[in-house]
Image: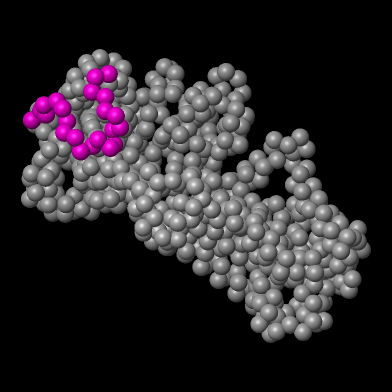
């Protein structure tokens, strides 16, 4: 098999993107970049039951059970094409930002990479098991923070000794105990920010091959965001790959060296952070710093209008 | 660097040949670096290994859930023993005092309480198993671990709960004058077999409950019916010897796994419950049910491993 990096069998655009970004990442100087995630023309389709039909009534539910075929049509099962034909290859040591307006398919794509959503077409190959860290990833609310750290660590496959070793580190990192002894209280008593910080701290305690972060950093305060960005850089040093979904362009700039821009489920741009963010900021209305707001080109419902053509001239 | 930017959605339909090419190339690239398809189901042996690696998680999760159960109650862990005792008291009041079922059964209170505790073990294992996946979606979606860890862990929690009940049972037995004998040792194999059976059942219910949450609404009725035919409050042996039931009904009543585990436990604990009251080949039945449910349930659960927590 071909061993040189330039013959890496990829789509032309992916090869250039990879070559460009691996050069900027500089994780493995002189070596061929090792792919950790290969996404090959992936489509993700959601099926939503009973949107137009009377799902609420008992007779409608009964007829759905009795005549699944016809009733499904009558109840109006709608398909939402959330991700369309996305391909890219991520390499070891890369931190990749995912940007796009609300409803553009970023979170869906991450879930599919994590193996939590089935893909309609195409394939996703990953190195090891990617871990998805989302805002609503609840642990066990009736248990104390302490128990959650232990259980979370064990569930991720750490040994009891490893969990014990890292326990203090996790608590310190989360900053839960800064305002008192909160770690021994049940998680249901935590504020949403505290809970999100603890979840991130637990998940970040392990060296993941591929870590997917879905806006989880947005909930923390500034000092916690600083710590997590440092931790992300550390994870990358251990040859991991980090994906970050964020509407905060500054945190993307601080942590990522490559950015994928998704719009209406399609990959619109894939390249170095600065270039993609420049285009994106122009697209969303120019405000640098905290992007994500889109005052002008607002679409009624992002996923439904996916077939429409993009309105700005495409760079080529 | 600007060539990077031509990653637009447009060219996909236009350039058909180049997109056909990378299909196998992506697969080849993935294969060369040992990448695996995301979210694919592991082989059965790999699955068992993964599960074994999570054994500490299973144990810790069960204990944590058990202690969290009554953490909001003022009496706290005292409820671990109070709940089974109150349960037994209610059944004694209805069946022993009001309906006077105790006629003909020696040591009726130990007989009844043993039946209630043993059946409750199966009942709550099935109930928590049904909700094991659908009730832990947050955990399932956040972390990766073999999903079978959840139903197994819930059953382990029920086993721990039963051990508390057994402490209460020992007190009841001694109060009602049942002498401790060597046959009490038989409790251990009976519990092991019943635990295996319950876990298998919980795995089956977990898969069904994750697909169709409605089952959780239906289960209480199924389980109550099961309890009434399992001879928890009456002696199957007694009824069969007095009435002339068709052979089919007799076989169904005697082969009922819940009845078998209940009768074995009574045989182990109560000296007035003789081996003659047990159905034929009772240990073979107990082992057979445990193996059938345990192995079958595990494989059935594993077959949908990649689908849990989706959608």
Q: Quadrant of residue A82?
A: top left
Front in this rendered view, residue A178 or B293? B293
Name the residue rendered at 69%, 60% in the picture: B224
Q: Measured from the top left, where is residue A54 in percent x and y? A: 44, 46
Q: Is residue A281 above or below residue A33?
A: above
Q: Residue A235 in the image: state x and y as whole percent.
A: 35, 33
- The structure residue drawn at horizontal position 29% and vertical position 36%, both measured from the top left corner, is A303
Give the left or right position of residue A262, taking residue B66 as reference: left
State the predominant SS element of the stretch in magenta: loop
Residue A44 percent location from the top left of the image:
29, 45
Q: Is residue A113 left or right of residue B57?
A: left
- The quadrant of the picture occupied by the C terminus of chain A is top left
The answer to if A214 sits in the magenta stretch is no
Q: Nearer the viewer, residue B91 or B157?
A: B91
Give the x, y percent position of residue A18.
Answer: 17, 36
Query: Residue B210 versus residue B79: which sits nearer the camera?
Result: B210
Q: Is residue A305 magenta?
A: yes
Residue in view at x 81 percent, y 63 percent? B112
In this view of the protein, can residue B222 be seen by the observer? yes
In the figure, is residue A82 to the left or right of B97? left
Residue drawn at point x = 58 percent, y = 46 percent:
B61
Does residue A250 appear in this view? no
Q: Say if A281 sits above or below B149 in the image.
A: above
Looking at the rendering, the stretch of residues picked out in magenta corresponds to A295-316
């Amino acid at each position: 098999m071909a061993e040189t990096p330039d013959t890496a069998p990829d789509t032309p655009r992916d090869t250039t993107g990879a070559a460009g970004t691996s050069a900027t990442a500089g994780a493995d100087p002189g070596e061929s970049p090792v792919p950790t995630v290969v996404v090959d023309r992936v489509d993700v389709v959601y099926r939503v039951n009973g949107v137009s039909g009377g799902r609420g009534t008992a007779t409608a539910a009964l007829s759905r059970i009795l005549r699944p075929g016809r009733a499904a049509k009558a109840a109006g099962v709608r398909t939402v094409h959330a991700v369309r034909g996305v391909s890219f290859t991520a390499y070891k040591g890369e931190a990749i930002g995912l940007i796009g307006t609300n409803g553009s398919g970023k979170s869906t794509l991450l879930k599919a990479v994590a193996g939590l959503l089935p893909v309609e077409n195409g394939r996703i190959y990953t190195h090891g098991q990617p871990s998805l860290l989302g805002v609503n990833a609840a642990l066990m609310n009736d248990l104390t923070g302490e128990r959650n750290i232990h259980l979370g660590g064990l569930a991720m496959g750490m040994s009891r000794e490893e969990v014990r070793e890292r326990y203090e580190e996790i608590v310190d990192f989360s900053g839960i105990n800064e305002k008192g002894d909160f770690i021994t209280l049940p998680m249901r008593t935590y504020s949403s920010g505290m809970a999100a910080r603890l979840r991130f701290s637990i998940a970040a305690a392990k060296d993941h091959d591929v870590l997917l972060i879905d806006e989880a950093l947005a909930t923390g305060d500034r000092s916690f965001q600083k710590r997590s960005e440092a931790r992300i850089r550390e994870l990358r040093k251990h040859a991991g790959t980090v994906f970050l979904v964020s509407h905060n362009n500054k945190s993307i700039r601080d942590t990522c060296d490559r950015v994928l821009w998704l719009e209406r489920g399609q990959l619109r741009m894939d390249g170095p952070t600065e270039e993609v963010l420049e285009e994106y900021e122009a697209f969303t209305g120019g405000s640098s710093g905290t992007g994500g707001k889109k005052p002008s080109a607002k679409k009624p419902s992002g996923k439904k209008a996916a077939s429409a053509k993009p309105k700005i001239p495409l760079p080529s | 660097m600007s060539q990077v930017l031509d990653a637009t959605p447009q060219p996909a339909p236009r350039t058909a040949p180049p997109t056909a090419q990378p299909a196998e190339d992506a697969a080849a690239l993935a294969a060369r670096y040992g990448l695996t398809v995301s979210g694919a189901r592991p082989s059965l042996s790999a699955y068992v290994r993964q599960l074994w690696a999570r054994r500490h998680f299973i144990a810790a999760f069960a204990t944590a859930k058990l202690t969290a159960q009554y953490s909001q109650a003022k009496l706290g862990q005292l409820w671990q023993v109070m709940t089974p005792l109150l349960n037994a008291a209610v059944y004694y009041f209805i069946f022993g005092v009001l309906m006077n079922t105790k006629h003909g059964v020696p040591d009726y209170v130990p007989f009844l309480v043993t039946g209630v505790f043993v059946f409750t073990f199966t009942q709550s294992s099935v109930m928590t198993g049904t909700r094991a996946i659908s009730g832990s979606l947050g955990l399932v979606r956040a972390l990766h671990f073999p999903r079978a860890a959840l139903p197994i862990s819930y059953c382990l929690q029920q086993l721990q709960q039963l051990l508390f009940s057994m402490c209460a049972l020992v007190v009841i037995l001694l109060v009602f004058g049942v002498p401790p004998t060597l046959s009490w040792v038989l409790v251990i194999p009976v519990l092991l077999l019943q635990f295996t059976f319950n876990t298998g059942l919980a795995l089956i219910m977990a898969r069904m409950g994750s697909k169709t949450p409605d089952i959780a609404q239906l289960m209480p009725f199924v389980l109550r019916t099961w309890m009434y035919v399992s001879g928890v409050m009456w002696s199957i042996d007694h009824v069969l010897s007095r009435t002339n039931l068709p052979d089919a009904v007799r076989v169904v009543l005697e082969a009922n796994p819940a009845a078998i585990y209940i009768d074995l436990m009574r045989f182990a604990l109560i000296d007035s419950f003789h081996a003659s009251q047990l159905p034929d080949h009772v240990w073979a039945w107990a082992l057979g049910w445990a193996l059938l449910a345990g192995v079958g349930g595990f494989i059935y659960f594993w077959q949908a491993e990649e689908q849990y927590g989706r959608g």
